[in-house]
Amino acid sequence: MEAKKVFSRIGIGLIIIIIMGIIVSGIGAAIIPEAKITESIRLAMMYIGFYILGLPIFLLLLRKAPCVEVEAKVKFSVIKLLKLCIIGIAGMYLINLINSGIMFMFTKTDGNAVSELLSNMDIYSVAILVVIVAPIMEELLFRKILYKVLGGYGKKFFIISSAFIFGLFHMNLGQALYASFLGLILAWVYVEGGNLWDVIFMHIFINATGSLFPMIVMSSENEIAAAIFGLWFLFVIISGIIMSINIIKKYKKSEKPLISDEIEEPKKITELFKSIGMLVYIVVCVLMIIMSIVVL
């Protein structure tokens, strides 16, 4: 199967996953009394549509695509993974701040759809759905499965394209931006380390820090806890920036490439935009992002 057809089928498969999520969520809203349906139930129904119904169709579409397996080159220690998490969280916080500021200028709201969703969920649902289920299923799809069908076109191509696809999948502006940034880090760790559990651990840690921990602090109504979280916020941003600078300096001085064992002629990211299915996926996600802004 030629590359253009593979990219197109990935786009079509992701659209099907999204549609299945919307359909199942809609069915749930239709059959469950309005007084009893919650954001937790809606999200759980959407995940059922995404991963139990949509994902098998996605895999079926790509059954004939050429596949490669990731090769482990680097063993990441827990400390190094946590450092990379800090960099990712720092980027997430900064992107959220910038996005919220820009959105407030135009819509008089912070535009943070995630905060609005989480505020209507209980802590246990967030722990299960956002902190555990989402990281496991998203890493399985956007790192392991996508690497199988995109890794053969170059590691750099996979890292950039999977991060871009992953960001768009979240379908709201703030998440699309910071998920793309996090996707770059997670994809690089997966490509270099070859261990799916490494990126699942990182994703769980990042999601817990960005959703569960703030909820616990807010629900406690404890000023000391709030102050500690504020200090954590500053620590993460400052240390994240410092560690990012140190990593850049380290690789500039070292002869070791950031991406090991790259193929001679990796595909360019622009190749994605030459496939109809992927273009449709991009358009659908962008329209959803625009709709999420307009609703605000």
Image (cartoon, rainbow, N blue to C red):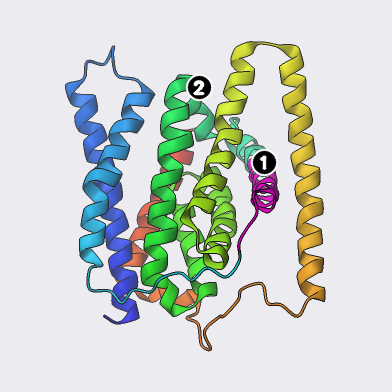
Is 84 part of what is drawn in magenta? Answer: yes
Query: Looking at the picture, which amino acid does disc 2 mark?
Result: Ser
Residue at position x 52%, y 40% in the image:
204
The alpha-carbon separation of the residues under discs 1 and 2 comes to 18 Å
In the image: residue 118, left or right of residue 97: left
**SS for tag 1?**
helix
Residue sticking out furthest to the left: 31
Front in this rendered view, residue 69 or 10: 69
For residue 93, which numbered disc appears in the image?
1
Whether residue 252 appears in this view of the structure is yes
Query: Looking at the picture, which amino acid does disc 1 mark?
Result: Tyr
Q: Quadrant of the N terminus?
A: bottom left
Does the magenta stretch mainly form a helix, a strand or a loop?
A: helix
Residue at position x 49%, y 60% in the image:
164
The image shows residue 145, relative to residue 131, as above or below, that is below
**Label 1 crowding class (10 Å Cα cut-off): few <14, some 14-19, many 20+?**
some
**Label 2 crowding class (10 Å Cα cut-off): few <14, some 14-19, many 20+?**
some
Q: Which residues are magenta?
A: 75-97
In terms of image quadrants, where is residue 103? top right
Residue 119 coordinates in the image, percent (x, y): 50, 22
Front in this rendered view, residue 204 or 36: 204
Residue sticking out furthest to the bottom: 264
Front in this rendered view, residue 47 or 72: 72
In terms of image quadrants, where is residue 128? top left
Residue 20 coordinates in the image, percent (x, y): 24, 45
In the image: residue 253, left or right of residue 106: right
For residue 119, which numbered disc appears in the image?
2
